[in-house]
Image (spheres, coloured by chain):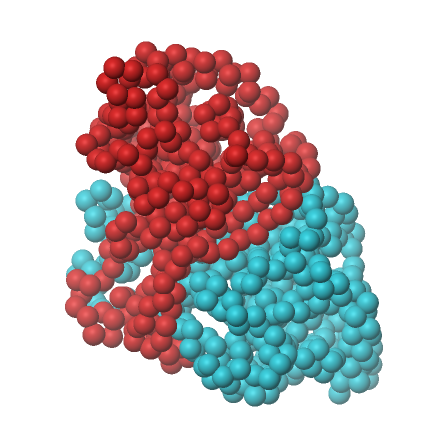
Chain colours: A red, B cyan
């Protein structure tokens, strides 16, 4: 049982968090004051060339030729005086893009800017085949042109508002709302605009985002991979490819953690935080995932320390926010009305468990 | 004939441009020094709710429900000391996203940052149904589920490298290169990663980007709409909806200008610049478009001033870069190796023809 020490850490964190939480006025971008960047820009990681003869059905664009897919778009901002703080890589979840981490639907500061203002270089990605990271429509045109059967149409979906409502735990079912739930539902129309079609079932396994994250980590020489939901497993898969360049993993409500029976060697000694919001026990979708992640965290720590010393020096931990007295968080923690309080908690965790780069 | 006065203006501009052009070292982001922002963030404009029963073919996501489409993603950065300079809205072209204006494929500063450093607030959009602006895949699933015939698959295409080579005027045909052509082809693999599928034939006419730009202009109360290629016609269509909030139009190699026989009232007195690169006469695709734009510019000025005073006080102009001594520009002016020289030319034009907001 690693619960006692995890709980002790959580209580410490809570105290730190309350101290570090920004005043209410800082929740508003407009009042945050000027921000000085050392540099900013964007680039792609990964990508492979694909030949096709069904790229187009229009006369103005040739059907045959080469396109590039699987690359991952990365936008970065580096604050002045970043020192040797680790770089933070923000990886969005299902049906969303890097917009997840920017200005909230009700116009408050996003985590991207909050972390910058705390002195951290911030890298925001769009998963492969999502947002500014190109996919291919060749399979659609192949069917349209009669060159492939109907069942070769790609498996793509949009999450409807009604279904997403439950998945994001705004309430038990649309349009019911959990008591005290912190998502700014007054701006829900703006949130729905963030949702985009999901092509992840039409791409190779593991998702090309994973090798791209590995290449990014090696390029950055020290990044905390911060995932959310669908992308929750990606940093773990990335570490399994290579731990080079990975300074830590923060999995926010991951769709999956590795199984406790997996090879846990890649996670030995790696600072890992799995973070959960509220109402998880009420969700048939999320409750088992939380349970599996708890087993994973326990297994990693047991693996790292041996059965006897279990807990001492453990590097993985799990925080369920209501267990440390923070109530009302939905699945979209980074946009809830206490989003910067949660971000401050993460900064504190990073300072204590990841520290600075050598 | 408005050519003499246009030419005189062009020569003046050239002189101004040479003076305003940044030194070679400033072409490199790394050497540009810190950048202080007053604020930054992102939001969506527009969007409509759509009901569908073919959103998904997966058990984990319901087929029926509501999604939001047609919205336009906008990312902005406001420099300190922007004063009352007009806001610049950057609108990318076909098969591309807002990435167009960011770091170039060979790692130089993008126009987004250059304009910021000149004191202009910068708004970068992703067209509707592109990048971070969601489209719908319901039509694909309708066919996949047998609820719609094959011919109702959306008309979507990817531009192949080989075809894009000619369209972007890197050379007459892939892989030939025009003499002196300025696109950084050594980094072409990075450029191809910027290209995404184009859904513009699957959306209403005018493109939902157009009413979104109109709403954006009214919200910004004074923006220069800077378009490229496919989006070239959008600012003109936007002005036809309402000129409110539009401080000027810069159309960079527009896919189309309005016809000289169109109602030109919306453009009367509006500062308009149509800008072209090199090798246009060699391109069967672009040569007639340039010719049509020249006729449009002449007609706008004739309309504005009357036949007798034609030229004097005219607000529309066209610059073909080789005609003012700048040679070698491809269709992707904002990424060519003299990209910041072109950007400086635009800043000079904006200062002289748009000025500051009241």
Label tally:
0
Quadrant in the rendering for residue B223: bottom right
Residue A3 locus on image (x, y percent): 30, 15
Residue B222 locus on image (x, y percent): 69, 54
The answer to which of A161 and A36 lies nearer the viewer is A36
Q: Is residue B158 visible?
A: yes
Residue B252 locus on image (x, y percent): 62, 70
Residue positioned 74% across, 80% down in the render = B324
The answer to which of B309 and B17 lies nearer the viewer is B17
Q: Is residue B204 above or below residue A230?
A: below
Q: Is residue B258 visible?
A: no
The answer to which of A336 and B237 lies nearer the viewer is A336
Q: Is residue B163 above or below residue A231?
A: below
Judged left or right of residue A7, residue A344 is right
Residue positioned 74% across, 48% down in the render = B82
Residue A31 locus on image (x, y percent): 65, 31
Quadrant in the rendering for residue A78: top right
The answer to which of B21 and B157 lies nearer the viewer is B21
């Amino acid at each position: 049982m690693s619960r006692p020490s995890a709980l002790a850490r959580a209580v410490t964190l809570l105290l730190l968090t309350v101290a570090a939480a920004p005043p209410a006025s800082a929740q508003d971008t407009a009042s945050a004051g000027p921000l000085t960047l050392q540099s900013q820009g964007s680039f792609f990681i990964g990508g492979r060339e694909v030949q096709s003869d069904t790229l187009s059905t229009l006369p103005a664009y040739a059907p045959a030729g080469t396109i590039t897919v699987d690359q991952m778009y990365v936008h970065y901002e580096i604050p002045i005086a970043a020192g040797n703080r680790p770089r933070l890589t923000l990886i969005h979840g299902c049906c969303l893009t890097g917009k997840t981490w920017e200005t909230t639907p009700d116009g408050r500061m996003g985590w991207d800017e909050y972390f910058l203002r705390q002195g951290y270089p911030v890298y925001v990605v769009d998963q492969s085949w999502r947002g500014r990271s190109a996919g291919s429509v060749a399979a659609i045109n192949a069917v349209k042109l009669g060159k492939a059967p109907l069942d070769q149409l790609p498996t793509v979906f949009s999450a409807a508002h009604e279904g997403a409502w439950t998945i994001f735990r705004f309430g038990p079912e649309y349009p019911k709302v959990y008591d005290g739930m912190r998502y700014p539902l007054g701006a829900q129309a703006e949130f729905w605009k963030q949702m985009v079609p999901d092509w992840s079932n039409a791409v190779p396994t593991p998702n090309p985002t994973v090798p791209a994250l590995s290449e990014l980590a090696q390029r950055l020489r020290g990044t905390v991979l911060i995932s959310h939901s669908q992308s929750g497993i990606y940093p773990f898969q990335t570490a399994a490819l290579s731990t080079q360049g990975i300074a830590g993993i923060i999995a926010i409500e991951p769709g999956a953690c590795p199984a406790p029976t997996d090879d846990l060697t890649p996670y030995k000694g790696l600072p890992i935080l799995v973070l959960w919001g509220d109402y998880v026990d009420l969700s048939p979708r999320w409750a088992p995932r939380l349970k599996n992640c708890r087993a994973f965290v326990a297994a990693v720590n047991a693996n790292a320390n041996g059965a006897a010393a279990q807990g001492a020096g453990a590097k993985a931990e799990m925080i369920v926010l209501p267990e440390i007295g923070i109530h009302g968080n939905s699945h979209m923690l980074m946009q809830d009305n206490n989003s910067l309080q949660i971000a401050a908690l993460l900064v504190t965790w990073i300072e204590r468990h990841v520290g600075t780069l050598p």
